[in-house]
Amino acid sequence: MDIQNLIQQFGAGQAVNPEASIPDTAEQVTISALALIKMLKHARAGIPFEVMGLLLGDIVDDYHIRVYDVFSMPQTASECFRGICGAQFFNKKMVELLNLTGRMENCIGWYHSHPSYGCWLSSVDINTQQSYEQLNKKSIAVVIDPIQSVRGKVVIDAFRLIPQQNMLSQQEPRQTTSNTGHLQKPGLEALLRGLNRYYYSINIKFKCNDLEQKMLQNLYKNSWTEGLKCNSASENSKRNESCVEDMSKLALDYQKLIEDESKKGEQETKIKNTGKKDPKRHLGLKVDELLDENLNAILGRMMATKGF
């Protein structure tokens, strides 16, 4: 029996099982690249609404949870209590179908999106998580923000509820056995919404195997046939018109910039235009884009007439 169990037994006046496992700060959630991409795509497709789905994986031990895959639910996450009855029926059917294909993972929690307002649990989310933890005490709730997530940085977090006896006795929800649980500093919005009072955060790490790395490298890779495609003449004409219009606006902005430099000086003009669009650079990019598209269109038509 550790010190926390003794304090809980004598301070709260309740008997505690000495062999019961208490959550600690060394616990981590490992999310595969496939699961992360599917969550992001599902969350982005549902903007501006919240969407939800279930996590497939296994609980390795008291310190490690693995998420291999996810699947979306046929409902939005803004529905009352996240449609728990329908979710459980859908989850059961989905797991049965996955088992038929040789996928033996179990449901270890759920995920939902918070478009543009960060990662935390609302009162409805807490009620939903309570129903999942009644089925499995180690279940987790993953929250992802598809709008604040940019390339190279995904806004995502995993949560689990604090037991009621710990809230009543005002004790720490987890044993501090590692600094892993404190690597990510909590945001102010999450603290105001009940983080470390009603639920706590679990550290997330991402892992890619060799097959997933090859998949990610080929995800947005263009095929060699892309260079042989030619747009129609009407599409090229519309693109040229819009590009020329943008170039005329940029040319006017560049003329104003030159006039400001002659009146106020180069240094003062640079300070004034800090953080604004540079018309000179964008004008050069537009010219290069216009030349490249027209040259490719001309060469493509020449090859098409000669070859076909």
Image (tube, helix red, strand yellow):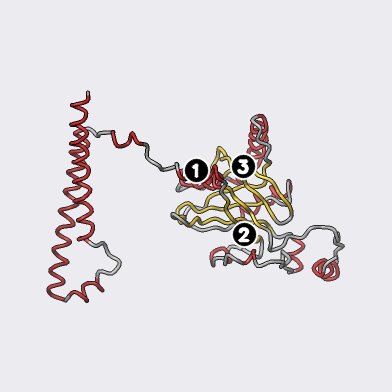
Horizontal relation, residue 53 to residue 224: left or right: right
- Check residue 214 in the rendering and tell me which mark sits there, or answer none: 1
Tag 3: residue type?
A: Gly
CA–CA distance between discs 2 and 1? 26 Å
CA–CA distance between discs 2 and 3? 27 Å
Which residue is identified by label 3?
A: 83
Which residue is identified by label 2?
A: 203
Residue nearest the viewer, comparing 80 with 216: 216
**Marks 2 and 1, the one that precedes in the sequence:** 2
Query: Which residue is painted at 23% across and 53% down in the image?
Result: 285
Secondary element type, mark 1: helix
Is label 2 in contact with label 1 (beta carbons under 8 Å)? no
Secondary element type, mark 2: strand
CA–CA distance between discs 1 and 3? 37 Å
Tag 2: residue type?
A: Asn
Horizontal relation, residue 169 to residue 273: left or right: right
The location of residue 215, given as percent across then percent down, is 49, 42
Query: Which residue is painted at 71% across and 50% down in the image?
Result: 60
For discs 2 and 1, the disc positioned in front in the rendered view: 1
**Marks 1 and 3, the one that precedes in the sequence:** 3
Residue nearest the viewer, comparing 46 with 181: 181
For discs 1 and 3, the disc positioned in front in the rendered view: 1
Query: Which residue is painted at 67% across and 43% down in the image?
Result: 107
